[in-house]
Amino acid sequence: MTKMNISELEIELGVSRQTLHKYKRLGVIVSDEHGKFDPDEVQTAILEYKNGAGAEQETETSAYWKARREKANALLAELELEKEQEKLIEYDSVKALVGEAVTELKASVAELPASLSRALLSCQDAEEAEKLIESELNRVVGKFRSALNDLRH
């Protein structure tokens, strides 16, 4: 039989061009220096590949992907369980709660000058003023801490 290119082999053997190129990449079939193939040699090589090393390779590949899929499913199940046990929280929830807490903190800090300026006028000395400022800062930080503690619940 005369040698053929991939397109002719596709028609002659009824094997898709894509599959023939795969076999060529894998070294199952080999072309001559002109890129031509002996159809009988190709057919024999494909059959040997399917019945021998190729079948082994396919089994190993299938086992690999099956194990990988099983591992991924197990990891997903663990994540779901941790989420149910409230060991995990979703990113969007955390982002929203932290955003709200920061907004409240900004508002509280923005109110400090007005509330402190009036109260500081009635202070008798620097020590009393310092205690007042510390108390107000603790109040603001406490509100922020309280808002962040909502992340745990």
Image: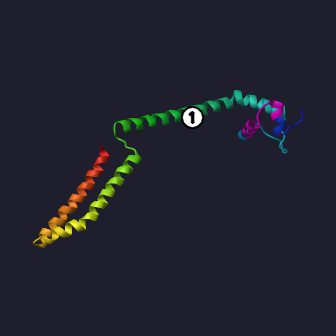
- What amino acid type is highlighted by mark number 1? Trp
Q: Main secondary structure of the magenta part?
A: helix
Residue under numbered circle 1:
65
Residue 125, position as x, y percentages in the image: 11, 73
Tell me which residue sits at (36%, 36%) in the image: 84
Tell me which residue sits at (13%, 72%) in the image: 126
Tell me which residue sits at (34%, 39%) in the image: 86
Please, which residue is most extreme toward the top here? 51
**Quadrant of image for the N terminus:** top right
Whether residue 33 sits left or right of residue 93 in the image: it is: right
* Above or below for 14 versus 83: above
Q: Magenta stretch containing residue 108, yes or no?
A: no
In this orientation, which residue lies closer to the viewer: 47 or 127?
A: 127
Residue 29, position as x, y percentages in the image: 77, 37
- Which quarter of the figure has residue 14? top right
In this orientation, which residue lies closer to the viewer: 116 or 21?
A: 116
Q: Which residues are magenta?
A: 10-24
**Quadrant of image for the C terminus:** top left
- Which quarter of the figure has residue 109? bottom left
